[in-house]
Image (cartoon, rainbow, N blue to C red):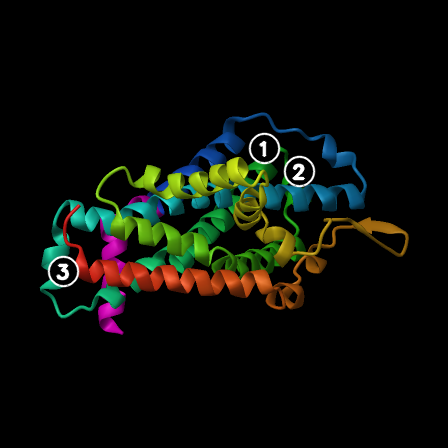
Amino acid sequence: MNKFIWLVRREFWENKAIWVMPACIGGLMVVGSLFGKVEIAMLHASDQQTEVAGVLFLLAIGGVFWVAMSIYSVWYLLDCLYADRKDRSVLFFKSLPLTDSETVFSKLFVALIALPLVYFAAADISALLMTFVISVRARLGFGIILWRPELWLQEQVLWLYVIATGILWYLPVVGWLLLVSAWAKRAVILQAILPPLAIMLAERLFLGTHAAALLFRDRLLGGGYVALHHPINWSLQKGEMTPGVWRLPDPVGFLSSADVWIGVALGAACIAGAVQLRKRRTDA
């Protein structure tokens, strides 16, 4: 266990962007709320409208961090095993009492769990600071509208749920990126993109269909449709319109989906392949 913790800490030491990038994004958002235009029209809005505004505010902040995290995660996964071979540091770590499985799983842990939690914390801190700044600038009005503890709690549950379901849904994508990182000698990004493109093109030319394109699209963009109830609607309760954030998670539907577990199996196979390649390849 101590070795695994050390390996994870090593990833944070060598990849400072893991925490620097979300800190910079949060800082820019806070600065934007400090010097940007503050619209106070919502001060005279109804309770339902202000509640909707609070939900959209929190979801918008979470969405920005989620997109940034997704982009950085792809780069990290493609670089993590390739960089060790490129600078030959893999030889040093192979001389230590560490297995290749431990090394690969430490990088997998950072990509699937540590990174989302870091961005989750950054999004929370940014939302709190932005709410405080806006409340001061708008003389405690607009900030109070945005800061609704019950909605903030719902966002925490929703974010953790999205992280948990995302680990399973995107495992084949993560496994593929790790496999390419362990295999490629150069042009890692191209080697990750070209095989799926070749499959889609070959299918289109020889079969005239586009099932592979739909499959790749659904795997990259369709996680929310499986993990969440959709379409995302506002529900009517007692004649009033209130955000149904608690109603969005659909864990039963997600865990009962065959697509989830097929993807998990494919992802596990790719990760196992990455471990075997890590044992055999020491140069890039």
Q: Mark 3 = which residue?
A: 93
**The N terminus lies in quadrant:** bottom left
Q: Mark 1 = which residue?
A: 137
Horizontal relation, residue 10 to residue 31: left or right: left
Answer whether residue 236 is magenta in the image: no
**The C terminus lies in quadrant:** top left
**Is residue 213 among what the camera can see?**
yes
Q: The magenta stretch spans which residues? A: 1-18
Q: Mark 2 = which residue?
A: 142
Residue 111 image position (x, y, % from top left): 38, 55
Local secondary structure at mark 1: helix
**Is residue 115 among what the camera can see?**
no
Question: In the rendered structure, which amino acid carries the disc numbered 1?
Answer: Arg
Residue 138 image position (x, y, % from top left): 63, 33
Residue occupying the point 49% across, 35% down: 29
- Measure the alpha-carbon separation of dots 1 and 2: 9 Å
Residue 122 image position (x, y, % from top left): 45, 48
Q: Earlier in the sequence, mark 1 or mark 3?
A: 3
